[in-house]
Image: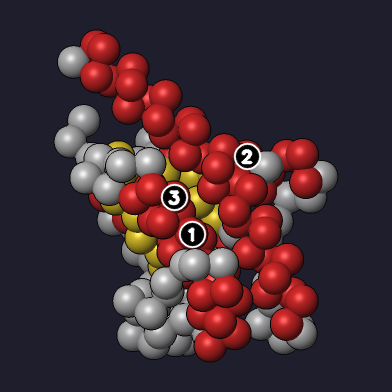
Amino acid sequence: MSQFSVLFVCLGNICRSPTAEGVFQHKVNEAGLGDKIKVDSAGTSAFHEGETPDERSQQEAKKSGYDLSYIRSRKAEAKDFVDFDLVIAMDIENYHNLSLLKTSGYDDKLKLFIRDYAPQLKIEEVPDPYYGGAQGFTKVLQMIETASDSLLAEIKEILETDERVG
């Protein structure tokens, strides 16, 4: 395996998925795995294509040392299931829309972020903070940090197994 790749997906790719991309990329870099793990994000819609993340997401992330300014919104495509090892949805609606987008044979690549990587939070979805107040962005960031730690641990195990086998 040359590079393990992860795609985070929400509705517009301006709040949750770019936050997940920025947080996870930061954690990957801190772990010294920037050359082994590719991180990206997308939206199930093209409402905000080419735009930077929501200013509130950027501000909340910046408070915790994460930079989202380099991210530009894009729409998820069927080929993302070929190009990425994991396609991680932020909520059930995103998951459903992605399941309609993918072709058969890629079922194991599609995940629901909180359900699959932070079940201890006792909810399944990362809530959309777009129409809420500042505390919604804080909550989303905290949830993403928790799930990102678990996801990174899982990918590290996969990479270590590949190194032993390869």
Please name the residue shown 32% across and 27% down the image.
159
Question: Could you tell me the amino acid type at mark 3?
Answer: Lys
Q: How far is mark 2 from mark 3, CA to CA?
A: 18 Å
Q: Which is closer to the viewer, label 2 or label 1?
A: 1
Q: Quick check: marks 1 and 3 in contact, CB under 8 Å?
A: yes
Question: Could you tell me the amino acid type at mark 1?
Answer: Val
**Which badge, 2 or 1, comes first in the chain's sequence?**
1
Q: Which residue is disc 3 drawn over? A: 27
Q: Which of 68 and 7 is in front in this view?
A: 68
Report if residue 138 is visible in the image: yes
What colour scheme does the image use? secondary structure
Q: What element carries label 3?
A: helix
Q: Which residue is disc 1 drawn over? A: 23
Horizontal arrangement in the rendering, residue 15 relative to residue 50 (left or right): right
Question: What is the quadrant of residue 162 in the picture?
Answer: top left
Question: What is the quadrant of residue 78 in the picture?
Answer: bottom left
Q: What element carries label 1?
A: helix
Q: Which of 40 and 137 is in front in this view?
A: 137
**Which badge, 2 or 3, comes first in the chain's sequence?**
3
Q: Which residue is disc 2 drawn over? A: 116
Residue 39, how many percent across, how many down?
Answer: 35, 55
Question: Could you tell me the amino acid type at mark 2?
Answer: Asp
